[in-house]
Amino acid sequence: MNKTLSIHKRNAVLNSMKELVKEHAQTILDANKIDMDSYDDSDLAMSDRLKVNDAKIDGMIESLRQLAELEDPVGVERFSFTHDNGMQIYNRTASFGTVMIIYESRPDVTIEAGGIAFKSGNKILLKGGKESINSNLAIVDLWHKALQDNDVSTEWVEYLNYNRAETQAFLENPTQTLDLIVPRGGERLIEFVKQNAKCPVIVSGRGNNFVYVHKHADVAMALDIIVNAKTQKVSGCNAVDKVLIDNDLPNKAQFIEDLLDRLAAHNVEVLGDDSLANYNTVKQIENDDIWYKEFLDYKIVIGSIPHTLAAIEMINKYSGGHSASIVTSAQGAAENFMASVDCGAVYHNASTRFTDGFEFGLGGELAISTDKLHQRGPIGLQHLVTNKWYVHGNGQIR
């Protein structure tokens, strides 16, 4: 399967899949109910990601609609050059070939990430978790119908119903060509893939995102941003886990009280450093290791910081390299923060919850990469390509 499908065929399959998801939404919901009934709810984030409802179905449909309308990412000219000897040299985007996506709990990945990989001209190998097997198989059945309806081989979308041992064996000795692997899940899954894979891996790592409330912050805005980033979806890797408050924030004590009240209304457990020791509802952190942790739960750590430079240094030390936000009316402080914080997405006066391929206008995302090669942050359609060189001559030799 070396030949990339035409863009007409790829878009036709995506449009067929969109209509099939609409038509068979109840089939997906019924399959997901079996998965949900079998899950023990031991992990809040996992349970939230596993559940499919009408809103998630709508998101799947919209992702497919957007993908079908986006420009073809394959064959885009990135560079051209005429050599002194007359050769014409071009660099154009190209498909990877076969992309394997290993993921936990999220059935919407079967559509969103699968759709991005397919539109990018790649064959897709989907390896979902056992907890979402019924949901995933129901969606893959629709993928196969969409392919068949357009006279395209179902080999373009393949589901690997492997256990852990079978998955490890496949990673170590693939039975087919494998060009790229994207693991989406917890740190244990990512480490498992990195240890066993024999081809490039794009790491969609931990969040552990920070909000820094600068001394010139609009405090009402800061409260809204923090509460949204923490509570709007706690299972999201773009949710906030840490808040740093500038020591020189005017009426800082009142701001902290207001923040604690707002978080308490959402039943968020608050841990704090020594500067919050006088607040009865705040648990004192036991050691600095807590600053490294991603919670994916109704839990947050709040601390004080002397200035912007210290906030930048702390974020760069402890965060997962995902997202960080500064709340301030001082443009210079914002620009310094955004240029210096080592995260894939940096924000000024906005919630970290927007770090998302769909929200960034990418038509969804394959993953949110915390690596720096070859793409950082949300990996959308135009990023899931490699490149190749085209050189036209008329007999030149060197």
Image (cartoon, helix red, strand yellow):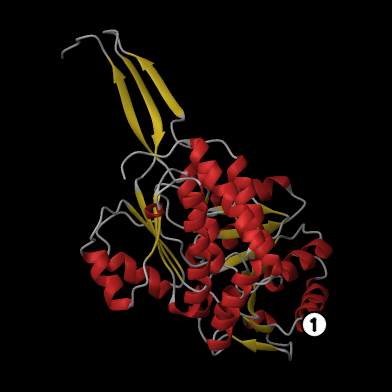
**Residue 379 at x, y = what percent?**
50, 51
Residue appearing at x 58%, y 46% in the figure:
67
Q: Quadrant of residue 126?
A: bottom left
Quadrant that contains the N terminus: top left
Residue appearing at x 74%, y 64% in the figure:
225
Residue appearing at x 71%, y 66% in the figure:
55
**Residue 185 at x, y = what percent?**
46, 70
Residue placed under numbered mark 1 in the picture = 265
**Residue 275 at x, y = what percent?**
67, 79
Judge from the rendering whether residue 347 lies leftward or rightward of residue 175; answer left or right: right
Residue appearing at x 24%, y 9% in the figure:
394
**Residue 78 at x, y = what percent?**
44, 28
Q: Quadrant of residue 111?
A: bottom right
Judge from the rendering whether residue 171 lies leftward or rightward of residue 383; answer left or right: left
Kindly state the secondary structure of the residue where label 1 is placed.
loop
Can see residue 352? Answer: no
User: Against 325, is 130 above or below?
Assistant: below
User: Against 48, is 368 above or below?
Assistant: above
Residue placed most toward the observer, 371 or 356: 356
**Residue at the outermost left position:** 398
Quadrant that contains the C terminus: top left
Q: Amino acid at mark 1?
A: Ala
Residue placed most toward the observer, 157 or 324: 157
Can see residue 309? Answer: yes
Tell me if mark 1 has few (under 14), some (14-19) or many (20+) residues whose alpha carbon lies within 10 angstroms of its own. few
User: Against 375, is 190 above or below?
Assistant: below
Judge from the rendering whether residue 282 lies leftward or rightward of residue 42; answer left or right: right
